[in-house]
Image (tube, grey):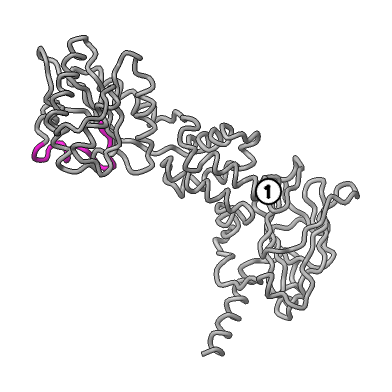
């Protein structure tokens, strides 16, 4: 499962997935409409800004695709660009061959071309991504291009993007020609939580996933939205990270089971048993059955095991009455703990409904129509035995308090 998720994750969210699909969320739609309006305006210049990963490049690339076929377009990345690089890249995209001529001659050629196009009522369009990353000398060339005009009309139209508000840039020294054209500005906004879910599922579908909602359930989408702030680039990063870690508990699930109704953090100050530490004892096993028929066995090789209907689970239970992320089992040196992850239909152990409990040897967990029998559960310590005298549903707060007290005693002894 990890290998499949790795391939799917890279196809949907990796570096080569940028052109996979364009998801038209609100800010993308509004930004595109702004740029189209800016090019129709007599001043013919628009500024688009937003943080890295906000979708600026995708937006301007779609703009370029939507422009009429008889519009001449040059699309340039301004990162570390110097005057000669700027001029040669523009001319090359306008159909001119590379030339060893001086910058002044290149500028003159570009001027003549822009004038000719404008007289034909189609002034060329120059899109510069990352304009704020250009060298100042290249910015001065850009300012000279902005001064091109014929018969009272500007001879070039511009779309400029940057990570910061470009208003300060165009008002700086040497940028007077651009400032005089009074460009409009649009600020990219992050995706909403709903747009995030649509974005993630759309990219998974485009990459070939038939059940995107099982890869990223709604609660996982919400967590990814919170982590990324709703910015598409960050969403890709965190989504890919989650899928590459799919053999472990997904990043969102930690927060799901880390807080219970009393806001007690269950993963703080609790030494969890590493499998390699269980020398001399048999690793716990889980036997999964349905209607008395064995479906498989799972031997603990990790200290946390997630069980549910989602493909993200370590043990996938294909049952309509099982939640996508139903329960998690935590393996300690003297206990195997079950936590219900707010499942829709609940969890029973030995026919009793539980939300948190210590599992013992031969306990039977019921999830929908499936049964999971516990084999070789760790022996419970004396402290845990005292807790087990209370009702089967364990209050996690008491368990944590005991663990913290033990940790403090060990620290004092070590000192």
- Is 287 placed left or right of 383 in the picture? right
Is 206 above or below relative to 345? above
Q: Residue at x 13, y 28 (%)?
A: 105
Residue 319's quadrant in the figure?
top right
* Residue 248 spot, x, y in % from top left: 62, 56
- The residue where tag 1 is placed is 1
Is 135 above or below relative to 64? below
Residue 299's quadrant in the figure?
bottom right
Residue 351's quadrant in the figure?
bottom right
Q: Residue furthest top?
A: 120
Q: Residue at x 28, y 29 (%)?
A: 127
* Residue 334 spot, x, y in % from top left: 71, 75
Is 322 above or below relative to 271? above
Q: Residues within 10 Å of mark 1 (few under 14, many from 20)?
A: few
* Residue 86 spot, x, y in % from top left: 23, 34
Q: Residue at x 65, y 36 (%)?
A: 211
Identify which residue, 83 or 106, lies in the foreground. 106
Q: Residue furthest right?
A: 292
Is 121 above or below relative to 240? above
- Is 26 placed left or right of 314 in the picture? left
Figure disc tally: 1
- Is 227 placed left or right of 201 in the picture? left
Find numbered disc 1 in the image and state the secondary structure of the residue it sits on.
Answer: loop
**Stretch of the chain drawn in magenta:** 160-174
Q: Please tell me whether residue 257 belongs to the stretch shown in magenta.
A: no
Identify which residue, 305 or 97, lies in the foreground. 97
């Amino acid at each position: 499962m990890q290998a499949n998720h790795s391939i799917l994750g890279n196809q949907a969210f990796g570096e080569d997935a940028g052109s996979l699909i364009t998801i038209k969320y609100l800010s993308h739609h509004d930004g595109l409409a702004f740029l189209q309006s800016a090019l129709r305006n007599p001043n013919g210049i628009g500024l688009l800004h937003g943080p890295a990963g906000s979708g600026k490049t995708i937006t301007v690339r779609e703009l370029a695709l939507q422009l009429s076929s008889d519009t001449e377009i040059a699309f340039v990345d301004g990162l570390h660009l110097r005057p000669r690089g700027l001029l040669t890249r523009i001319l090359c995209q306008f159909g001119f061959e590379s030339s060893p001529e001086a910058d002044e001659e290149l500028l003159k050629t570009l001027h003549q071309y822009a004038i000719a196009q404008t007289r034909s009522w189609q002034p060329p369009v120059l899109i510069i991504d990352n304009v704020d990353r250009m060298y100042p000398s290249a910015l001065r060339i850009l300012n000279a291009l902005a001064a091109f005009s014929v018969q009272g009309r500007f001879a070039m139209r511009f779309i400029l993007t940057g990570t910061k508000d470009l208003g300060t840039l165009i008002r700086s020294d040497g940028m007077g020609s651009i400032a005089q054209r009074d460009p409009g500005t649009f600020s990219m906004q992050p995706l909403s939580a709903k747009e995030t879910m649509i974005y993630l599922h759309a990219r998974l579908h485009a990459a070939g996933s038939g059940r995107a909602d099982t890869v990223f359930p709604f609660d996982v989408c919400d967590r990814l939205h919170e982590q990324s702030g709703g910015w598409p680039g960050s969403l890709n990063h965190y989504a890919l990270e989650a899928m590459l870690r799919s053999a472990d508990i997904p990043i969102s699930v930690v927060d799901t089971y880390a807080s219970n109704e009393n806001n007690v953090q269950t993963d703080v100050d609790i030494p969890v048993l590493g499998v390699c530490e269980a020398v001399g004892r048999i690793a716990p096993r889980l036997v999964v059955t349905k209607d008395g028929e064995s479906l498989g066995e799972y031997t603990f090789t990790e200290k946390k095991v997630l069980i549910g209907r989602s493909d993200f689970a370590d043990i996938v239970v294909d049952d309509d009455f099982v939640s996508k992320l139903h329960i998690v089992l935590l393996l300690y040196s003297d206990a195997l703990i079950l936590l219900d992850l707010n499942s829709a239909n609940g969890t029973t152990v030995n026919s009793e409904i539980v939300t948190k409990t210590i599992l013992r040897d031969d306990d039977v967990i019921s999830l929908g129509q499936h049964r999971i029998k516990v084999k070789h559960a760790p022996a419970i310590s004396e402290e845990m035995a005292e807790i087990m005298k209370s009702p089967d549903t364990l209050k996690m707060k008491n368990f944590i308090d005991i663990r913290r007290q033990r940790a403090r005693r060990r620290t004092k002894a070590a000192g």
